[in-house]
Image: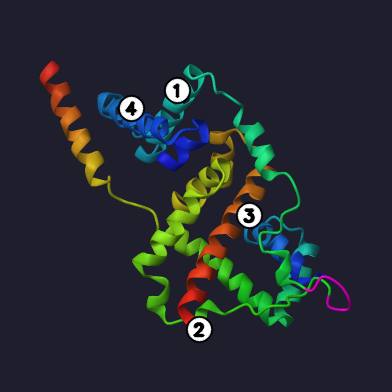
Amino acid sequence: MTRVALAFVSRRAVADEVVQETWLNVVRSLDAFEARSSLRTWIYAILGNCARRRAEQEQRFVPLSEIAAGEASGDELGVSPGRFFSGGHWAGMWSTAVSRWEDLPEERLVSSELRATLLEAIDALPCMQRAVLTLRDIEGWPPKEVCDYLGLANGNQRILLHRARAAARSAVERYVEEGTQ
Amino acid sequence: MLTCADIVKLVTDYLEGRLTPDERARFEGHVAICPPCRAFLGQMRTTVELVGDLREEDVPPEMEEHLLAAFRDWRRDE
């Protein structure tokens, strides 16, 4: 939840407060909860309200769509361009090996170390990429709900998701290759 | 003809089902004959699964403690 709150407010300490305030509101208004939506959706709606209010109080409110547009701009592949041939007959083709993770021993991809590595990579993402990845791939929201929640156009949502997933893939790749050398 | 770099660029649109039928056919045609791109597509799918596994079902312990304390105070106030 802190990862999502960080899309709205910029400081970690404020995001932590927003999450605490959210839980307090959840507990206080639990009686008013009607099972029309899932509890999770309802909690996230409260989180969004708390976070927006805090952002306004702190007068740091830049529309999320604007931050998202910044994060989605530029031509970024998601994989270092150095991994491909840059010219000649093979231009744009892989110049480096891409390993099949299916061939790895299963325990290689389920360690708590890898989990920590992934979380670290996600925390290092720009705030909108982190929020999109968290809601889409950790919380499992459909694209439309993420767009509505964060006020994003679907095209930008997809670009942010692509960049965030690409960064996560690179982190796993570094981890996997370190271990096999 | 799509290059491998194009496959990398399009992979999320592909996984999201956002390619046109023509683009999709070209994407799959490339991946079918290109082992590194097949490996890359597998890596992306695995990454999405690994990130999905990070989901926490439980409230973190320190938050739970905080919540319970808050809940007790609130009951007392009533």
Q: Which element carries disc 1, helix, strand or loop?
A: helix
Is disc 4 in contact with disc 1, using a CB cutoff of under 8 Å? yes
Residue A142: x and y in percent read: 54, 47
Q: Badge 2 is on which residue?
A: A103
- Residue ID for mark 4: A21
Q: Residues within 10 Å of mark 2 (few under 14, many from 20)?
A: few
Numbered tag placed on residue A178 in the rendering: none
Cα–Cα span, label 4 and label 2: 46 Å
For label 3, the SS is: helix
At numbered mark 4, what does the secondary structure look like: helix, strand or loop?
helix
Q: Amino acid at mark 3?
A: His
Label 4 marks a residue whose chain is: A
Q: What secondary structure is found at the residue carrying circle 2?
A: helix
Tell me if residue A141 can be seen: no
Q: Examine the structure image and report whether residue A159 is included in the region drawn in magenta.
A: no
Q: Which chain letter matches label 2?
A: A
- The residue at the point 36 percent across, 69 percent down is A111
Q: Amino acid at mark 1?
A: Arg
Q: Is residue A22 left or right of residue B52?
A: left
Q: Nearer the viewer, mark 1 or mark 2?
A: 1
Region in magenta: A85-90
Question: Which picture quadrant has residue A38?
Answer: top left
Q: Earlier in the sequence, mark 3 or mark 4?
A: 4
Q: Earlier in the sequence, mark 4 or mark 1?
A: 4
Residue holding disc 3? A162
- Give the mark nearer the N terminus: 1 vs 3: 1
Where in the figure is residue A82, as x and y percent of width and height?
72, 68
